[in-house]
Image: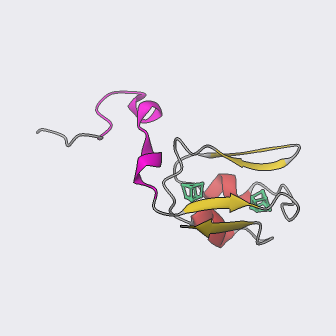
């Protein structure tokens, strides 16, 4: 079977997969609203979010703009922008 370009064809391949190029909307974090609960980290399908002492940080190399983090954030700290 031939896999399409962009498929994860070898162990660890997802790390090199630039899912950020799929993005049509981008999450924008309001750090003043972020309560550092890390719920967004658990929900992000691309493991693109980390939370440090300042709050939620998103790695745009992997963020594909699905909007799940924005929907799940209990503090309304993430909005999606075109
Ligand atoms: S879910 Fe919202 S409040 Fe919680 S860490 Fe993520 S951005 Fe911050
Ligand atoms: S929009 Fe949010 S949940 Fe979706 S990939 Fe980007 S950071 Fe992850």
Quadrant the N terminus occupies: top left
- Residue drawn 45% across the image and 62% down it: 24
Q: Is residue 61 above or below residue 36?
A: above
Say whether residue 28 is left or right of residue 17: right
Q: Is residue 29 above or below residue 54?
A: below
Point out residue 26 in the picture as x, y percentages from the top left corner: 57, 60
Q: Is residue 19 magenta?
A: yes
Point out residue 69 in the picture as x, y percentages from the top left corner: 63, 63
- Residue drawn 57% across the image and 45% down it: 60
- Residue drawn 52% across the image and 64% down it: 25
Point out residue 41 in the picture as x, y percentages from the top left corner: 67, 52
Q: Is residue 3 magenta?
A: no
Q: Quadrant of ligand 2?
A: bottom right
Badge count: 0
The one nearer the camera, 27 or 2, is 27
Point out residue 71 in the picture as x, y percentages from the top left corner: 63, 72
Name the quadrant containing residue 74: bottom right
Say whether residue 78 is left or right of residue 4: right
Image: magenta residue range = 7-23
Which residue sits furthest top? 11
Which residue sits furthest left? 1
Q: Is the image coloured rainbow, by chain, by secondary structure, or in one colour?
A: secondary structure
Which residue sits furthest front? 82
- Residue drawn 87% across the image and 60% down it: 35
């Amino acid at each position: 079977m031939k896999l399409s370009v962009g498929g994860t064809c070898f162990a660890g391949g997802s790390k090199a997969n630039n899912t950020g190029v799929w993005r049509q909307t981008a999450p924008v974090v309001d750090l003043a609203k972020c309560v550092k609960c890390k719920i967004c980290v658990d929900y992000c399908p691309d493991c693109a979010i980390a939370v440090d002492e300042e709050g939620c940080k998103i790695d745009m190399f992997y963020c594909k703009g699905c909007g799940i983090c924005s929907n799940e954030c209990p503090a309304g700290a993430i909005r999606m922008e075109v």
